[in-house]
Amino acid sequence: MNQKKEPPRLMKGNEALAEAALRAGLQAYFGYPITPQSEILEYLTEHGAKRGAVVLQAESELAAINMVYGAAGAGARAMTSSSSPGISLMQEGLSYMTSAQLPCLVVNVSRGGPGLGTIQPAQSDYFQATKGGGHGDYHLIVLAPSSVQEMADFVFDAFRLSEKYRNPAMILADGALGQMMEKVSLPAEGSLPPGDKPWATVGKPASRERNIITSLFIEPERMEEVNLHLQKKYHEIQQEVRYEEIETNDAEILLVAFGLAARIAQKAVELAREKGIKAGLLRPITLYPFPSQIIASLSRKVISFLVVEMNAGQMVEDVRLAVAGGRPVAFKGRMGGMIPSPEEVLEEIVSIAESYRIPAV
Amino acid sequence: MEVVTTTNGMELVYQKPSTLTDTPFHYCPGCGHGVVHKLLMEVVEEMGIQEQTIGIAPVGCSVFAYNYMNVDMQEAAHGRAAAVATGVKRVFPDKYVFSYQGDGDLAAIGTGETIHTANRGENILVVFINNAIYGMTGGQMAPTTLLGMVTSTTPFGRQQAVMGFPLKITDLIAQLPGAYYVTRQAVHTTNAVRKTKKALRLALEYQPRKKGICFVEVVSNCPSGWKMTPVESNAWMERNMFPMYPLGDLKVPQ
């Protein structure tokens, strides 16, 4: 998306995301405090109202996501943000919103779990984010930023995609991306015009039938129709797949990592290259839709895969499905809020290289 | 008043409001829901606010309220109608927003949303149908079920030692400064129906004042859940429900 951008400034990830949301035409935000995302709520309560957005601190994440449901159903560009335990509480609402086909943006500045877990960054919500998360057959559109710049940019993409497909979108970040400060060039205000929402409940004029926002389709024939429509939509969404390739041209060991882990993996690739090992990185930017095709096609060129995640091994399952047994897929993960170092990842790369006797140049 | 004649030459003395659809109610014979739906929609028609009205349906017997009420509507998750209504009202502060909820939805699973929505003084109307039972799921105990009352999950009667007391949530709401108008009515007699309609009318007329939540409880019957005829259920309601949930205004605008 071509956007005019301002000169760079130094901002925290959460604040850059919140500011970007206002510039993306946010109309209604409902949130609840939880570390490490509270700056989004704080920033929007300070700046939102004077820039025309409804901003309300809800009494719980349950209330917040259902306020988003109401506002989105009324046609507003609506958003909430939370972190892992709070996102778990929102799953019912997200299931309802996908069935009722309501667009919205949900930001998960995720932290280590399970349970109350830790406030340190983790990627252990990958399954929840990409496989549905709540009950029923559905998906969110999931974008995974790996920098403060992308924390800001992806707000625009997430709103655009969610409104295009009338499906909730999620930005799956982590505590480090939310808390760290980096250079960011913010997109200009007003570059995402509000879309036409003839289905919204705005009050029924005599000229049309009433609009109904519902996820209840009690006849199984009708419920199956709704499901078929959703599946057709998810098929179309596959065309929105995005990824970044780094040093993949001649790569023999291909790393796959998203978000913060991708930055660590990228450094590990550099270190490996310094040792003469032809390593590369594929970074999925959309986690749903997942870049299966490029992984399948790269699997015909590389010798081995190494998936790096800040969890016990979640995305690795999707990589293995894409590779379909064609190549070995190794996994390196840290859990519970621990962040792997580039050197740790490098060790894995070296060990794989040695096992295949990939010669150093 | 203009006299309208029907096709067979008879004087038209009553007709269904245009704000109700032609879909026949699915409610059981004798149930209060149909009456309250009709009253609410009559008020919307008489006030001429159909174009500015957005309703929220709950989970429970009135989950299909949007099939009958001819206004834009959203169907909320169980207990979350007040939060959904908040979302709509904050986006459209000058439109009329109501939620329509039963006792299980509003006073059990949705207690948090109910209290906080009232406490914020959201300028919405909450219509609360209290029939002391989960009707839709087959007659289980509700938070408002009376002590000793037999339901499918209190087969020996609700025992206080096990299941605590009936929750008089409307009394709680009336204590909150965010509540503007709180009243408890019924629809079991012609007189009661008139009073409920008046309460609903007042509640919607108050909404543009932006002074807080208007909360109209309607103590109702559930012939199927209570396993009584409609006539028996109304008599039982008067005898047993009204002492616990006395009719009248709990809070009126000062």
Image (spheres, coloured by chain):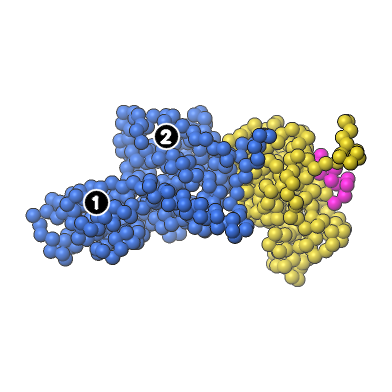
Q: Amino acid at mark 2?
A: Glu
Q: Is residue A310 left or right of residue A138?
A: left
Q: Quadrant of residue A218?
A: bottom right
For the residue labelled by badge 1, is the local secondary structure a helix, a strand or a loop? strand
Subunit of label 2: A
Chain B, chosen colour in render: yellow
Q: Nearer the viewer, residue A343 or B2?
A: B2
Q: Is residue B196 magenta?
A: yes
A289 with respect to B34 (left or right): left
Give the CA distance from mark 2 to mark 1: 30 Å
The answer for which chain carries disc 1 is A
List x then y, in percent, for residue A237.
42, 48
Start-end of magenta stretch? B188-198
- Disc 1 residue type? Leu
Other residues around mark 1 within 10 Å, as few (<14) / some (14–19) / many (≥20): many
Asked if residue B247 lies left or right of residue A226, the reply is: right
Residue B155 versus residue A99 in the image, above or below: below
Where residue A353 appears, as percent x and y from the top left, is 16, 61
Residue B36 shows in this picture: yes
Vertical placement of residue A86 versus A220, above or below: above
Residue drawn at x 78%, y 40% as measured from the top left: B17
> Which of pointers 2 and 1 indicates the residue nearer the eye?
1
Q: Is residue B128 visible?
A: no
The reply, left or right, for residue B90 in relation to residue B225 is left
Residue of label 1: A281
Asked if residue A332 is positioned above or below residue B179 in the image, the reply reads below
* Residue on which the image places disc 2: A19
The residue drawn where x is 24% and y is 63% is: A327
